[in-house]
Image (tube, grey):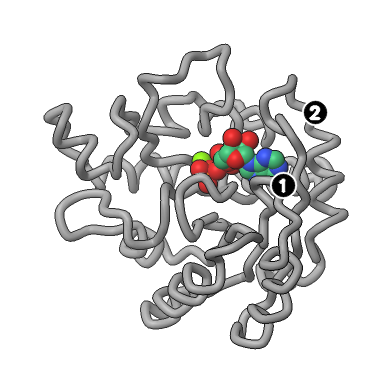
Amino acid sequence: MMKFIFVTGTDTGVGKTTISACLSAFLSLKRKLNVGVMKPFESGLSKRNKDELPWDAICLKEASGSSDDLNSISPYTFEAPLAPEVAASLENVKIDLNMVDRIYKKILNEHDIVVIEGAGGVLVPIKKNFFYGDLIKRWGCPTLIVSRLGLGTINHTLLTVGYLKTRGIKIIGVILNNNDGTGDLAAKTNPTILSNYLDCPILGTFPYKKNLLRDAMNRQYLARLFATHVDTEKMLNALDL
Ligand SMILES: Nc1ncnc2c1ncn2[C@@H]1O[C@H](COP(=O)(O)OP(=O)(O)O)[C@@H](O)[C@H]1O
Ligand SMILES: [Mg+2]
C-alpha cells in the first residue's frame, strides 16, 4: 500500500526539515521501511552550497537513506529565498504541476512511505492561485504540522489546523518544536493551552538540539530522538501503519 506524510509548518524556520529528517530516519531505521522523500519546491539556494547544510533536499535524502536523485527529490529549486510563485517568476520559470505529479507518483511507487516537506505554511503560493494547501489536497496526503514551541505559536497553530480542516485534509497531529532553545513562560504554557483548543493530537514537544542536521548526520541519533520525544504509536496508528 502506498503511504505518504506531508510535513507542513506554521511558518518558515519552525523546523520542518529538522522534524522531517528525524521522522524519515525513524521510519527507516526503527520501522524498517523503505522511505522516500520529497521537497517539491525549494527556494533560497543561492546562499547555500553543498558543504553548508541544511539544504533541505540533501538533509532529507541523507536522513531517509533514499537513493533517489536530488532532481527528483526536489524537482524545482530557486535562488531567491521566496515563495515558489514569486521565486519562479523572478527566474522566468513556469511550474509544470503535471511533471511534479509524475515524479511524485514514481517516488510513491518505489518506496513503502514518502515524507514530503512543504515550504513556509499552507497558504504559501506555489503558482498563481495554487497554494501548498491545494497541493496537499491534490495528492490526498495526511499532514503532520510542525509548530514552534515558543511565543506566537497559539495563533499560527490554530490558524493552520483550522485551514486544513476546512479543506477536509487529514491531520495526523502537531509537533511543538523548540527551534530556538527558549524556555520562557510561553514555551512552558503553550502545550497545555494548545491542547485545550486543538481537536487533533499534540504528538510531542521536540527539544532544542544545536546543529542537529549540520554535524555529520547521525541517522541513529535522529531516529532515537524522534522515538523519544514523539508519540510514535499514535502517529503510526493515524497512518494505519
Ligand atoms: N529542535 C531544534 N533544535 C535546534 N535547532 C533547531 C531545531 N529545530 C530547528 N532548528 C534550527 O532552526 C532553523 C530552521 O529549521 P528548519 O528545520 O530548517 O526549519 P524549516 O524547514 O521549517 O524552515 C535551522 O537552522 C535549525 O538548525
Ligand atoms: Mg525546510
Residue 108 located left or right of residue 233: left
Taking depth in this image into account, of 3 and 86 the one nearest to the observer is 86
Q: Kindly identify the amino acid type of the residue bearing the numbered disc 2.
A: Asn
The image quadrant of residue 62 is top right
Q: Quadrant of the N terminus?
A: bottom right
Q: Which residue is mark 2?
A: 218
Q: How many marks?
A: 2
Looking at the image, which residue is at 87% across and 54% down?
228
Taking depth in this image into account, of 236 and 224 the one nearest to the observer is 224
Structural crowding at the residue carrying mark 1, measured as other residues with C-alpha within 10 Å and reported as few (<14), some (14–19) or many (≥20)? some
Residue 39 horizontal/vertical position (percent): 46, 40
Looking at the image, which residue is at 57% across and 12% down?
51
Residue 131 horizontal/vertical position (percent): 28, 58
Residue 134, above or below 218:
below
Instruction: Find residue 129 and name its label.
Output: none
Looking at the image, which residue is at 74% across and 25% down?
217
Q: Quadrant of the C terminus?
A: bottom right
Residue 103 located left or right of residue 181: left
Taking depth in this image into account, of 64 and 34 the one nearest to the observer is 64
Q: Which residue is mark 1?
A: 181
Residue 20 located left or right of residue 161: right
Residue 73, above or below 10:
above
Structural crowding at the residue carrying mark 2, measured as other residues with C-alpha within 10 Å and reported as few (<14), some (14–19) or many (≥20)? some
Q: Secondary structure at mark 2?
A: loop
Looking at the image, which residue is at 48% across and 68% down?
156
Mark 1 CB near ligand 1 (8 Å cut): yes
Kindly tell me whether residue 78 is visible in this rendering: yes
The image quadrant of residue 47 is top left
Q: Earlier in the sequence, mark 1 or mark 2?
A: 1
